Image (spheres, coloured by chain):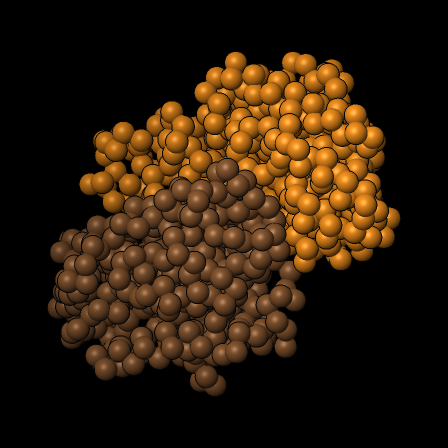
Chain colours: A brown, B orange
Amino acid sequence: MNMLRELETPALLLDRAKLDANWRRMSGHIAQLGPSLRLHVKTAKSLDAVRRLHGTRPGPICVSTLKEAEVFGSHGYRDVLYTVALAPNKVGRAAALAASGIRLKVVVDNVELAKALAGAPLDVLVEIDSDGHRAGLRPDDPRLLEVARALAGGGATVAGVMTHAGASYHCASTEAIRAMAAQERDAAVHAAQRLRDAGFPAPAVSVGSTPTAAFADDLGGVTEVRAGVFVFFDLVMAGVGVCGTEDIALSVLATVIGHQEDKGWALTDAGWMALSRDRGTARQALDQGYGLVCDAAGNPIEGLIVADANQEHGIVAHRSGDPARLPRLPVGTLLRILPNHACATGAQHARYQVLDETGRVAAAWERLSGW
Amino acid sequence: MNMLRELETPALLLDRAKLDANWRRMSGHIAQLGPSLRLHVKTAKSLDAVRRLHGTRPGPICVSTLKEAEVFGSHGYRDVLYTVALAPNKVGRAAALAASGIRLKVVVDNVELAKALAGAPLDVLVEIDSDGHRAGLRPDDPRLLEVARALAGGGATVAGVMTHAGASYHCASTEAIRAMAAQERDAAVHAAQRLRDAGFPAPAVSVGSTPTAAFADDLGGVTEVRAGVFVFFDLVMAGVGVCGTEDIALSVLATVIGHQEDKGWALTDAGWMALSRDRGTARQALDQGYGLVCDAAGNPIEGLIVADANQEHGIVAHRSGDPARLPRLPVGTLLRILPNHACATGAQHARYQVLDETGRVAAAWERLSGW
């Protein structure tokens, strides 16, 4: 068991107690509302992390890549939803996964892809657009039934509908998120009903995003909720009001390597390669730069952000830009940077250094990457 | 040898003929001016790619991580400059590299780090700030000699000076870049002369960035030029005027997986996980979104960019936002996306699919990652 000071920087830190608490809060909330919780593993991308949450019984997961489906599938996770419409060049690989005994569900929102699935032993959810932010058919779109007919005609199972109200990331209040959760639910439930009215079984009604999952108060008709980033949380979620910065389980450990005193800069060895290029807080009320700067114990230092980043250099400064407000941070000082976007920052690293309740490094959990 | 159509998407493509041409142009230009060219391998991060350029004789390289130094060092690259000021927690690892027979040069810009190097068998360059954009001491800073004395006192070799005029990335004209190249040269030459006047040998005068390297017309007093991104080029470099989009050797292969016709969107399976979150063209005259969209042969499609990106979804649209200007791109269409920033996009992938002159996949070159 190591102390932080024994790590080489930059390093990705995961606070296990916060991870556990975030999971308890969300899983308790969804259990109370009724649907099952399908964890999106695209954030953690780590068997060890997901096992920590699910315990000895693998629960339902969703994945953003077939690689995730393969790795988790080969370790007992048999109920897997792949949440990106299946491109024709991936159908063979998905079918092989299904043939290996994994119950792989995929999504499509158009007749062309539905036809490309002909003959593949897959459960298929039709993707519904509940908020205009990305993919899917509007709940009333006549093509919903065309897609279902094309699926059934090719031998696939029309397993239901899925939607993701990603626009919730840009909601300005909890009231707005709650309204978005109702809109997400209504869109999915309505589309599923249209399928059932037309004779398709469509048992699954899958909705979710971390904000709508956190603030939903009525999920009538919904069978499962998907969410991922809540396990770590991040500054974007804090800016949306879904968590506090004290709930963020992920941080990047960095070392001060120099200063430009007249500019009020401390330079660190954690640039965008360690933090990611994500600037998700740029359009929020409080722009956190490339991350919020904490001391080695994880407590934010008043006003300090990563103001700019090059590949392997971070520039730490007070958000006011006032050089006099940079505190004394001698060369060699360890800092922890809270990330804008946990999925993006995690993806820059091969493993987590897992901190226990005493702040010591209790384990290293490997991450997977690629497609 | 595969056709593009046999690849699963997203995939990182490297056009070998463009790589070769970019190398020929830059190495010829620097050779004509006199200094040696020290290739920055932080862009390619691939032994195969650098071997393609250097041929059978490993040339001098610079690295952004000790991991790069170790991988290249163990494959015959013995003249290595690590361009990030060496944090105290990395001194032991750097010293072990030097002890293994690699001539490892490191940089520092403060007395604290200089003292932390005491006893390590390293050549050290003092980092000079030639443009105010990041680290280093101003050429006239009295601390320059203090750092040199601290180095010499600890037994390190004061091997010279290095500077990187990264501000050249934001120059608005080739005249401005040429002036920046002169400023970069003058700062380094002047600082080296101060060290020599004080009795330090300081033979090395190392300067460079892709823009200043490309447009420098007089490098008197400079011993070596460092550059990296020129091997691939990217949209940021095209925006600065250092290359044309037709010189960009790197692209991401994506598949169209759906549409939102009323918005003029084609959705692809290349999101920010494949493209990176880099938005380096956002502050240039021509904002390229998350990348410029080309057909499968690599020819730009008029006005088409990746307007937005989620983790595994790209949203392709005409830059005007006019839905009528989205061309017909049926589901299954292959597209190639030119990246904003080659270093950032490359870092999202484990390997290059290398295209030969006929556009076929001739090889897969592995990339390294991490620290």
Q: Residue at x 21, y 73 (%)?
A: A222
Q: Is residue A288 left or right of residue B321?
A: right
- Above or below, B156 against A139 in this view is above
Image x and y of residue B332, in percent: 39, 45
Q: Is residue A366 left or right of residue A213?
A: right
Image x and y of residue B282, in percent: 38, 34
Q: Quadrant of the N terminus of chain B?
A: top right
Q: Is residue A151 left or right of residue B50?
A: left
The front one of A29 and B209 is B209
Residue B80: in sight, yes or no? no
Q: Quadrant of the C terminus of chain B?
A: bottom right
Q: Residue at x 28, y 41 (%)?
A: B265
Q: Quadrant of residue B33?
A: top right
Q: Quadrant of residue B38?
A: top right
The front one of A309 and B256 is A309
The front one of A332 and B296 is A332
- Above or below, B97 against A190 in this view is above
Image x and y of residue B55, in percent: 79, 33
Q: Residue at x 72, y 53 (%)?
A: B116
Q: Is residue B216 left or right of residue A252?
A: right
Name the outermost residue toward the bottom. A56
- Above or below, B43 against A136 in this view is above
Image x and y of residue B365, in percent: 66, 45
Q: Residue at x 62, y 18 (%)?
A: B182
The front one of B28 and A6 is A6
Residue B158: in sight, yes or no? yes
Badge count: 0
